[in-house]
Image (spheres, helix red, strand yellow):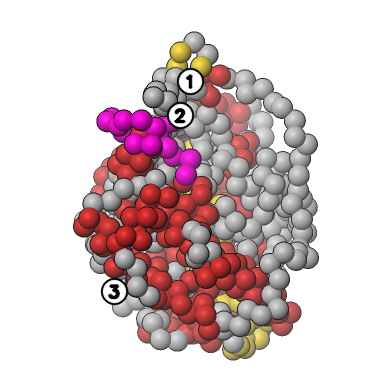
Amino acid sequence: MKITTETINYVAKLAKLKFTQQEADQFANEFEKIFTHFENLDKEDLTGIKLNEFNEVTSVLRKDEMKVFESKKELFQNVKKMRENHISIPKVIE
Amino acid sequence: MINIEKLTIAEIKKGYIDKKFTVIEIVSAYIDRIKRLDPKINAFITLCEEMALKEAAILDDKIENGEEIGQLGGIPVAIKDNICTKGIKTSCASKVLEDFIAPYDATVVKKLKDAGAIIIGKTNMDEFAMGSSTENSAFKITKNPWDLGKVPGGSSGGSAAALTAGFAPLTIGSDTGGSIRQPAAFCGNVGLKPTYGLVSRYGLIAFASSLDQIGPFTKDVRDCALSLEVLQGNDPLDATSVNDTATKDYLTDLDAGIEGLKIGVPKEFFQEGLDPEIDESIKGSIKKLKEMGATVEEFSLPITESGLSAYYIVSSAEASSNLARYDGVRYGYRAETFEGIEELIVNSRSEAFGKEAKRRIMLGTYVLSSGYYDAYYKKAMLLRKKIKNVFNEAFKRYDIILSPTSPILPFGIGEKTEDPLQMYLADIYTVNINIAGLPAISIPCGFSKSKLPIGVQLIGHHYAEKKLLQAAYNLEQSLGVYKDIPELKGVE
């Protein structure tokens, strides 16, 4: 199947990524090969298979209880910038 | 002192009991070895020398006082860098998380520490576990200790290489589509991917949540069984972790023999694309199994190739969603120049993600995007269900399914980086096992003429790890190749 550079740029926008023209061309090229390979899915007979029927073990849920994370310092150590007890982020609204 | 590179967990444990060496001696010996040899192997991203020696001293005191030191007491362990370790950098080998210090321990790390294991360092990997060669790390390329020109496999290549190079008797990896088994095969280790749900994923930085599973690399199957006893078990913090399993004891009866064991060999795993030397080696394993009284039968498992497509669609779709959180806003890499929130996110992500991570995000976004969902994602999910059914049917007839772990021998560094599809095809024998959530183990079964390791994969039914480990143990003991370690030519 044909994948164009425009398609790549559109998907990049959805994925919040940006590429140079050269990178986008390369992706289009690679994706064409990869998706052509994926076409082998079409030879599978998938009739009668139901996605939403489960007869396996079910998820194990715990009670949704609040727990206090003891060490605030450790919790926030990866934050770029703190102001008092708040995470400070760059200006996002003009 | 002793040749630590040869020691198994069981031997170290015995050494502590017999007072042959202290924990500090063992830990220091490994650290010295890592410092001396790892600059040429590149297995580690972070070495935890100070912390490890401190822990070792505490354990030596405990031994001195006659206290219990736990099932893995004083055993150094290296952890893949996508598993959270409190207070230690956990980078996923990505520029995105280059400075990320985990604020808590993953459940498996907590379990290892509770069992007395000592974290010696964090190992290199493909960025966010995406890859089959460990060449996608943002920091370094890990070399295969058997041949420094070859890749160690991936994505847990650092853990596999560290084990093989004798940097630790136990290393931990994660397996989403073969990321434990394939590097285990490439490096000549025992590598286990447990049943989906047997080991908690809490604290494992997510790649594809419905496929990811944590497991051990060890020198032999007995060590693997011992490690699994420590790693497994229900965790309230992981809703996909199983409530109760048939057994928590994998060591008893490990040597019970395999008389009457029914083994199925899928003929689709032995077709075009399989290296003839691997083919020959696997046939040698089949012969051994027959000699030990197992019945081996060829059968058809006609989902191999399309299963690979389903795997790459499902795993990339989940990855695109899981990696959406890295936006540069609260933590992780942030671009220096941007105007407004949109550019902040786009620039941060575009500057920090490596090529393969971007490729998977793009593939995943594409298959989930409007107009393509039915053609790809939905079809892949339907096929996933079919694959599960096909395996369920097969396990009505067989106890174990046997196949090669990888169709190819360890390949050269740089050999496949320019062709992603070729790289993906290298996962053909391992991905379907993750799609079906089954347990599978790779054990060394021979060497190529060029002295590169070959692995055989044994696949079990859900939660049948006990039987799987018994079969693997018997095969390993009769083959005997697991004791070989590399000479490390050009390193020492």
Q: Is residue B336 magenta?
A: yes
Residue at (39, 24) in percent of width and height: A94
In this view of the protein, can residue B55 be seen by the observer? no
Task: Give the main secondary structure, helix, strand or loop, of the magenta stretch.
Answer: loop
Q: For residue B273, what is the image quadrant?
A: bottom left
Residues B21 and B444: in front is B444
Residue flagged by tag 1: what amino acid is it? Ile
Where is residue B207? Give x, y as percent: 50, 51
Residue flagged by tag 3: what amino acid is it? Ser
Q: Is residue B136 magenta?
A: no
In the displayed structure image, the side of residue B269 where residue B107 appears, left or right: right
Residue flagged by tag 2: what amino acid is it? Arg
Q: Chain of mark 3?
A: B
Residues A30 and B70: in front is A30
In the displayed structure image, the side of residue B398 where residue B55 appears, left or right: left
Q: Nearer the viewer, mark 1 or mark 3?
A: 1
Alpha carbons under labels 1 and 3: distance apart: 56 Å
| Image quarter hosting the N terminus of chain B | top left
Disc 2: CA contacts within 10 A as few (<14), some (14-19) or many (>=20)? some
Where is residue B11? Give x, y as percent: 53, 51
**Residue B450, numbered circle:** 3
Alpha carbons under labels 3 and 2: distance apart: 50 Å
Q: Which residues are magenta?
A: B324-343
Q: Which residue corresponds to mark 2?
A: B330
Q: Which residue corresponds to mark 1?
A: A87
